[in-house]
């Protein structure tokens, strides 16, 4: 079980590093059109930043930032964004995941609409990969037994 | 028996290495994969998708359905970890009741 480390150097370095790791992850996702990168790579980097926070700040603080419920919702919503864009193309009258038809609602030329469709899909992939990375690490580090279950019950009841 | 197993592995490996002799050279422009759809993707990707990176356009646009499946695989891996590792609430209650000494 990971818990808050006593070493102030590790905590301070992690606090400094995490924002830069997350900015870099967003850059990798957004810049996939022009350089190596994309949703899978950026999502893994973004997930690594949350895992670093979990390792250095312990389970309780990490759950306040990103609980296992949020991770589950994010992992499903990323896939929903992907298939939602595909279904939107289907509704607009073209094939599944044929982003060219998105130009009808985005008011741009079809080639640009395809570029934006790729970006939306990459964001969905990134969210799913990030949440699944965190969720798997969360389950392995706790052994699946999540503490403080009583507090959640009290909040709900 | 062990000698037979090692012999099987070595012979199979040699057959596979012999099989690679018929494969096209690395980056051969006349090989079947390079002559079928690859040139079309490389030539038309900027005009059709406004994306300079051909890898991204093939991954997310031309082969978008495949990438949707990949994302589903990752999602399934996360859900499987939750299903296998995370204990149920009933078991938690039993654990809490059986360890009253902890608190």
Image (cartoon, coloured by chain):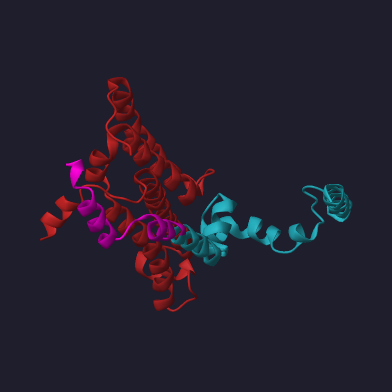
Chain colours: A red, B cyan
Residue B95 picture location, percent across and down: 26, 53
Residue B25 picture location, percent across and down: 83, 49
Q: Main secondary structure of the magenta part?
A: helix
Residue B40 or residue B99, whichever sits in front: B99
Residue A3 picture location, percent across and down: 28, 35
B19 relative position to B48: left or right: right
Asked whether residue B53 is in view, the answer is yes
Q: What stretch is highlighted in magenta?
A: B77-103
Residue A10 or residue A151, whichever sits in front: A151
Residue A101 or residue B85, whichever sits in front: B85
- Identify the residue at horizontal 40%, vertical 53% (top origin): A132
- Identify the residue at horizontal 45%, vertical 63% (top origin): A109
In magenta segment, residue A50: no
Q: Quadrant of residue A76?
A: bottom left
- Identify the residue at horizontal 33%, vertical 57% (top origin): B87
In magenta segment, residue B89: yes
Residue B61 picture location, percent across and down: 53, 62
Q: Indicate the quadrant containing the C terminus of chain B: top left, top right, bottom left or bottom right.
A: top left
A45 relative position to B5: left or right: left
Vertical side of B25 occupied by B44: above or below? below
Vertical side of A58 occupied by A157: above or below? below
- Identify the residue at horizontal 34%, vertical 61% (top origin): A77
Q: In which quarter of the image is residue A13?
A: top left
Q: In which quarter of the image is residue B41?
A: bottom right
Counting labels gives 0
B44 relative position to A156: left or right: right
Residue A28 or residue A1, whichever sits in front: A1
Asked whether residue A107 is in view, the answer is no
């Amino acid at each position: 079980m990971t818990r808050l480390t006593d070493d102030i150097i590790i905590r301070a370095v992690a606090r400094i590093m995490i924002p830069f790791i997350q900015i870099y992850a967003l850059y990798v996702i957004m810049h996939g059109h022009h350089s190596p990168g994309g949703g899978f790579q950026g999502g893994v980097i973004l997930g690594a930043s949350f895992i670093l926070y979990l390792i250095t700040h312990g389970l309780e603080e990490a759950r306040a930032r990103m609980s296992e419920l949020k991770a589950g919702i994010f992992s499903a919503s990323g896939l929903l964004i992907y298939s939602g864009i595909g279904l939107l193309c289907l509704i607009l009258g073209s094939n599944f995941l044929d982003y060219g038809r998105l130009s009808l609602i985005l008011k741009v030329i079809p080639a640009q609409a395809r570029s934006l469709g790729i970006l939306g899909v990459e964001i969905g992939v990134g969210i799913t990969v990030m949440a699944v990375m965190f969720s798997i690490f969360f389950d392995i580090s706790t052994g699946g037994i999540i503490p403080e279950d009583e507090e959640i019950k009290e909040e709900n009841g | 028996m062990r000698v037979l197993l090692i012999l099987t592995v070595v012979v199979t490996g040699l057959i596979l290495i012999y099989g690679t002799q018929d494969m096209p050279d690395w980056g051969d422009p006349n090989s079947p994969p390079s002559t079928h759809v690859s040139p079309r993707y490389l030539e038309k990707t900027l005009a059709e998708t406004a994306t300079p990176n051909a890898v991204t356009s093939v991954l997310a646009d031309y082969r978008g359905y495949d990438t949707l499946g990949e994302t589903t695989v990752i999602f399934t891996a996360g859900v499987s970890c939750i299903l296998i590792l995370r204990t149920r609430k009933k078991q938690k209650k039993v654990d809490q009741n059986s360890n009253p000494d902890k608190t």
